[in-house]
Amino acid sequence: MAKKTKKTVRREWTKDDIKSLKSHSKARTPVAKIAKEMKRTVGALRQKALNLGMGLGHQR
């Protein structure tokens, strides 16, 4: 029997999501904690932060 793969569900970034990400960036919240709170992957958060031109996590 073949393994079932998890289907990728993409969610749009709302203005509130971006606002929240910016405030977490300023507060220097750990990325893993942000990921749990926003229900997004660490990679997705880092990619969005990169596109917005802001630092996230310890890579500043």
Image (cartoon, grey):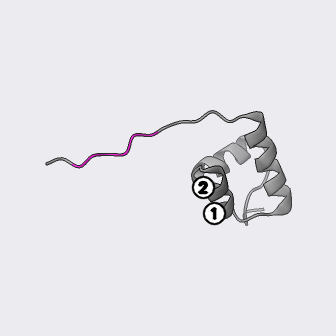
Which SS class for mark 2? helix
Q: CA distance from mark 2 to mark 1?
A: 6 Å
In this picture, residue 29 sits left or right of residue 5: right
Q: Are marks 2 and 1 in contact (CB under 8 Å)?
A: yes
User: Is residue 5 located in the magenta-colored stretch of the structure?
Assistant: yes
Inspect the image, locate mark 2, and give the three-letter code of the amino acid beneath it.
Val
User: Is residue 47 located in the magenta-colored stretch of the structure?
Assistant: no
Residues rendered magenta in the picture:
3-8
- The label on residue 32 is 1
Which SS class for mark 1? helix
Residue for point 59% across, 49% down: 40
Residue for point 23% across, 49% down: 3
Inspect the image, locate mark 1, and give the three-letter code of the amino acid beneath it.
Ala
Is residue 30 positioned above or below 6 on the image? below
Query: Which quadrant of the view contains residue 34?
Result: bottom right
- Residue that numbered label 2 is attached to: 42
Q: How many marks?
A: 2
Query: Which quadrant of the view contains residue 19?
Result: top right
Mark 2 Cα-neighbour bin, 10 Å: few <14, some 14–19, many ≥20: some
Single out the residue that lies furthest toward the left.
1
- The label on residue 4 is none
Q: Return the x and y of residue 18 as percentages of the image width and height.
A: 76, 41
Q: Would you say residue 4 is visible in this rendering?
A: yes
Circle nearer the N terminus (2, 1): 1
